[in-house]
Amino acid sequence: MNVEIVCGPGNAAAQVMLGPGEDCTAEAGAMIAMSADMDVQTTTHKKGGGGLLRAAKRLLAGESFFLNHYTASSAGGHLWLATTLPGDMAAIDLGPESLIVQSGSFVACEPGVDIDMGWQGFKSFLSGESVFWLNMKGPGKVVLSSFGAIYPIDVDGEYIIDTGHIVAFNETLDFKISKAGKSWLSSILGGEGFVCKFHGQGTVWCQSHNATGFGRTLGPMLRPRS
Amino acid sequence: MANTYQGWAFHESLDGGKAHGTISVDRTGVTFRWDAGSVELPLNGLRIALGGAANRLVFFRHPSSVESWSVCTSDRGILKDRELATKPMLQRQLSAIGSTRRLAILIPVLMLAVIAGLLLLAYSVRGAFVRVVADRIPVEWEEKLGDTVFRQYAGEHRPVDSEEIDQGMTIILNRLREGVDDARFEFQVHVFDDPDVNAFALPGGHVVVNSGLLLAADSPEEVAGVLAHEMAHVTQRHGLRQLIGAAGLYVVVQAVLGDVSGILAVIAQQGPMLAVLKYSRDHEREADRKAFDYLVAADIDPLGLARFFEEVRGLADGNGPLGDVPDKARESLTFLSTHPDTGERVERIRALAAAETTGREWRPIGLQYGRFQSTFQKTAREPEGTPDP
Amino acid sequence: MNTEIVGGPAFAHIHVDLEPGESIIAESDSMASMSADLDMVAKFNGGFFKALFKKFLGGESMFVNVFTNNTKGVRRVTLVQATPGDIGSLELDGSSYCFQPGAYICSTPGVHLGVQWAGFRSLIAREGLFRLKVSGKGTVFFGAYGALKQKEIQGEYIVDTSHLVAYDPGIKLRIQLAGGIFSSLFGGEGLVTRLEGTGSVVIQTRSLSGLVGWLNPKLR
C-alpha cells in the first residue's frame, strides 16, 4: 500500500494506492472517494480477530466502533481518506514495534497492523490527552491525523512537549508529567502548567495546535447552550 | 536451543541509531543479532530494567563493557527465560522488576482513592478556602469595587443634603468607631432619600442608610445597631466571600494556589450584584455576633438592634404604631426581605445580652433622636397623608 | 538565533533555534515543544501594573515566558498560537508597531512591549480599550486566525474591524458604520475601521467573530 499526503497541513487528505487484491483498514467515515471496483466490508474487528471487546475498547480510545476494510480488485485501486477537523495527516512506516497514538488520531493502516487500546497510567489525566491511547503494533503502514501541523522530533535523551500536543510516539519512549520552567511557579504563571517530558530514544510526532486551545479561545464568544 | 525474542538495539553506530533483530540468552550473556552483526552483553554486570512507554519494555544494558548500547524487547517472557531466571546474580534485579510491576498496579488504585477523598475534603472545607482567597484580595481592590458600585447607586438615588442629619449620623458613627477595632476600613455613612426601610454596606466601607429606616427607628441605639451590623458585613468581607463562594471550586483553588486573576475577573463582573445582595444565613449570624461585640465594646446598648428588628417586623405585620411611618414604607420593607428569620435573630441577640452583659450600664448616645427625626422629616420628601410636624 | 516559520498559512508554527546564551520572549502558553534543557522563566508582562492592565483591558496575558539557552549547544523551542492561522514576522529598528489584542506571539529580547490607549470607540467595536505597542530593536512574531496580508496604504483605507491585525502607529483609526444604517444592518458588515495616514497595515483573511457568528445560530 502506498500513501501520499496532499494539501497539508491545513486540509490534508491521504491518497492510498492499493495493488491488486491489497487490503486497507480505515476508520468508519474517513473515506471521501475511492475506485468504483473497490470491495468494502464493515465490521467491528480487524481481519483476523478481535471482535466486540476490541471494538468497545476502540470506542473508549476515541475511535469509531466500526472499521471499514477496503479490498482492491485485481486491477488495483485507490482510496482518498480525510478527517472531520482541519489539520494535517502523517503516514508512518512501522517496523515490528508498537506506536502509541493519541485517541482519535487513527485514520487507516495496513491489515497486518494490530490496533488495541492502551493505558499509559494516571499521568494521562494531566497530559492533555485522553486517558486512553491506541497501541498500534507493526509491521505495516499507519496513517494518522491531527488538528494542527504534524512535525516529528527525534528524541535522544530528553525532550519536552506541551500537554495536548502529542500525536504519537514510539514505545521505546516514556514520558513524565513535569514542569516547563525552572520552578513550578514559572510553569504555572507562564501559562504552560504541566508539560510532558519524554525520555529514551525514539521519535515523537507533535501537533502544532490543539483543539482544546482553539476551543478555549473560541468558547467564550459562543452563545451559551440553553 | 536458546529461546529468541524480537527486539531492538540502540547505538549511534547503527543506521538511524537503531536496529531491529533478535535477542537470545545463553550461559555467557544476552546476545542481540541483526542483519549487519551481533553484540553480546555478558551476564556478569548485566543491568535489567523496565522502560519505554508505560514501562512495558525490558531493557538490557551493560555499562562497564558495552556502554552506550541499549537492547530492549517488548516480550516480557524473556524475564522467565531459564538462563536468566536461574542466575543468582540476576535474582535481585528480576525480583525488583517483579515488585515494580506489582506496585504499578497498586499505586493507581491508591491514587484513585486518595483523589476521591481529597475532592470530598475540598468540598467540605470550601468555606475555609473562600476565606483564604478573600484574605488574598487586597482591601484597596475592595474599596475600588465598593466605590464603583456606590457611585452607580448614588447616581440613581437622591442623597439627603442636610448638615443636621450629617452631624447626627457623625455622632452615632463616632461612638460606634470606639468599638470597631478594624483599622483596615474607612467607614463612610451616606443617607439617601428613600422611604424604603433599608440599609446596606459595600465592600471597602461605604454604608448606605435610607431615610425610611431612620424614620422607622426609635432611638440612636437602634440606628447604631443597624450600622454595627452593616459594618460587620464589611469587616468580615461577606460581600466578597459571597461572590467568591459562588465562583466555582476551580477558580477558588486557582486563587489559593496564587493565580488570583480568575477570581478577580469574577468579582469585577459580579460587582453590581453587591448592591442587591442577600447574604447567606451564616453570614447574617456572623454579622449579628460581630455587631453585638462592636456595640458592647463601644458601650452602646446592644439590645437596640433587637428592638429595631422587632419594630420593623411589627410594622410589616401591621401591629406597630403606624403614625410615624409612611404607608409606602410598609410595602417595601426591603430590610426585612434581605434579613429573614427576624424572630430567630431577635431571640439570639437577647440571649447573648442575657448571657454576657447582665447588669451592665450603657452610655447613651448623645443625640436627641426625636429632634433628629423631625429635622429629618423636614428635609425628606413629604409623602401624602402625613400630618406636618 | 535561527527562526523558521513552517506549516503556514493554515497551521503556522515557529521553530526557534537558540544559540548558547540567547533568549526569546513568548506569550503565555505558546510553547508546543522544547528541548528539556532550555530554561523557562515566567515574568510579568512589563511590570505588575502594566501586566494587570494588559490582561484586563488589552486582552494580553499577564505573564510572558522567557526561554534561555544556558547550555553549550544549539537548542530548539517550537512556538505556536491557539488559533489556526498564519504567522508573520516584523523587523523593528527603533520603530514601533501596534497590534490588536491577542496577535502577539513572541519577540527577541530587544523589543519592548507597551500598551497604547485605543479610545472608547475601540471598546464599542469590541476590540478592547488598549492596543499592544511594540518598539525597540529586534524581531516580533505575530499571528492571526486566517492568512495574513500586508498592505501599504496612502490616504484612506477601510478594513472590517475584526480583520485588522496590526498597523503602523502613525495611522489613525476611526470606527464607523459600513454603509448607511441599512447596509450596516443587512449587509452584514456592521462596524468598520477607517484607516487614515501613510504606512503599512496587516489584515487577516478570516475573523473569529465571523466564525462565531456562523456557529452561534447553529447552537441550539
Image (cartoon, coloured by chain):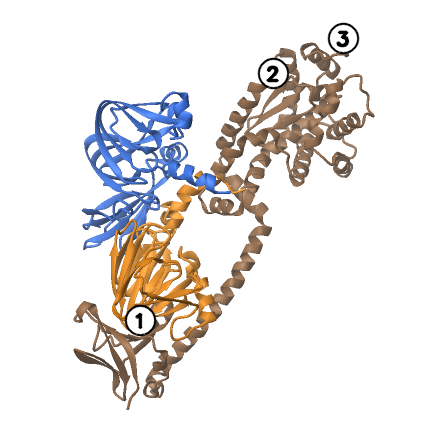
Q: Is residue B107 left or right of residue C26?
A: right
B60 to C190, vertically: above or below:
below
Image colour assigned to chain B: brown
Check contact, mark 1 vs mark 3: CB within 8 A. no
Q: How crowded is mark 3: few (under 14 residues within 10 Å), some or many (20 or more)?
A: few
Question: What x and y, as percent, mark residue B379?
Answer: 67, 10
User: Which numbered dot is residue A138?
Assistant: 1
Q: What residue type is labelled 2?
A: Arg
In the displayed orientation, state which residue is furthest to the top.
B388
Chain holding disc 1: A
Q: Residue at x 41, y 21 (%)?
A: C181
List the residue tagged with mark 3.
Answer: B388
Q: Where the N terminus of chain A falls, by quadrant? A: bottom left
Q: Disc 2 or disc 1, which is closer to the eye?
A: 1
**Nearer the observer, A61 or B133:** A61
Q: What residue type is labelled 1?
A: Gly
Q: Disc 1 or disc 3, which is closer to the eye?
A: 1
Q: Distance between the residues labelled 2 and 1?
A: 80 Å
In the displayed orientation, state which residue is furthest to the right.
B319
Q: Which amino acid does label 3 sit on?
A: Asp
Question: What x and y, as percent, mark residue B336?
Answer: 71, 30
